[in-house]
Image: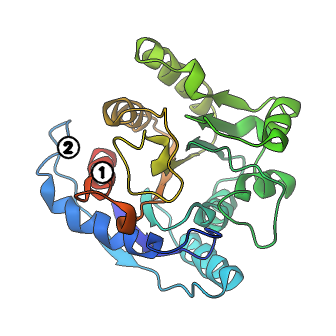
Amino acid sequence: MLILKIPLSAGALNKKKGLERGPDRIVEHLKDFYLSERGVLPLFNIRGVSVDNNNLEEAHALIQAEVENINDYALLLGGDHSLTYPAFKAFAKHNPGAGIVVFDAHPDLERSHTPPTHEDYLRLLIEEEILDKDKLILVGVRNMSKDEKKFIDDNKIKNYSMRSISFDILREVADSIMSVARHWPKVYLSIDIDVLDPAFAPGTSYPEPGGVTTRELLYLVQRLKMLRNLGMVDIVEVNPDKDVNDITSRTAAKIVVELG
């Protein structure tokens, strides 16, 4: 499986420092895991992209060009969440009608900027008609603006907020996501590490209390890995500068292994 390291921090607005170190730190911790929980030893082809964090528009263009050259299942390691904008554009170019499942504490649907940041990239993908609003599934949201809530409500976007999720119904949530996503031509899975409760992932720039546990996220990831039309995954917003004993980077590495 190809792992593409994307040390992007330019799209993170006021909390950039450290995000560019996330990809390397996650890769360092891959060696901590012998096998996935399925008993599989994943084989990784790891390479990196050099981006200019002083020029977000140029960085996005470079990321899009790199992802357009990927034809097989791949995992992208960020870096800030704005990288999903160029990555999904490239993915959708190869896979018309593709949808996206996003694990995140925030909906990332603020009024769009140009170039898009980690707060608004999803809204711009919808407004530019690259992503059909009916092919977006949000999981783990627990903090949003009034404008984002209105956008979600007005557009009837499928949103499994933390308020609606408990471990008792986690299987139902996974079943529901898969029942929709399996009918898409291809699935892009985006995992913002802040979907986890800060007790489990302190190393992120925008921690939000009341998130899922590591075991709950692993369960959902392991289920979605079973989708035959899963084509690409990204893991974003790991910030080693804010981490405690590398637990967030190690957790991200664990997720990589389970997706291998």
Check disc 2 and give the amino acid type: Ser
Is 216 left, or right, of 49 in this rendering?
Answer: left
Where is mark 2, residue-wise? 36
Q: Are marks 1 and 2 in contact (CB under 8 Å)?
A: yes
Considering every residue shown, the one lying at the far top of the view is 168
| Residue ID at (37%, 29%) | 216
User: Residue 260's mark?
Assistant: 1
Who comes first in sequence, dot 1 or dot 2? 2
The spot of residue 257 in percent (x, y) is 26, 50
In the figure, residue 137 lies in which quadrant? Answer: top right
Residue 42, x across and y down, in percent: 22, 54
Q: Residues within 10 Å of mark 1 (few under 14, many from 20)?
A: many
- Amino acid under disc 1: Gly
Q: Number of callouts in the render?
A: 2
Query: Percent x, y for residue 52?
Result: 57, 88
Horizontally, is 86 left or right of 212 in the view? Answer: right
Locate the N terminus by quadrant: bottom left
Instruction: Give neighbour class at mark 2: few <14, some 14-19, many 20+ (Cα, 10 Å).
Output: some
Q: Nearer the viewer, residue 41 or 54?
A: 54
> Which residue sits at x=55%, y=34%?
140
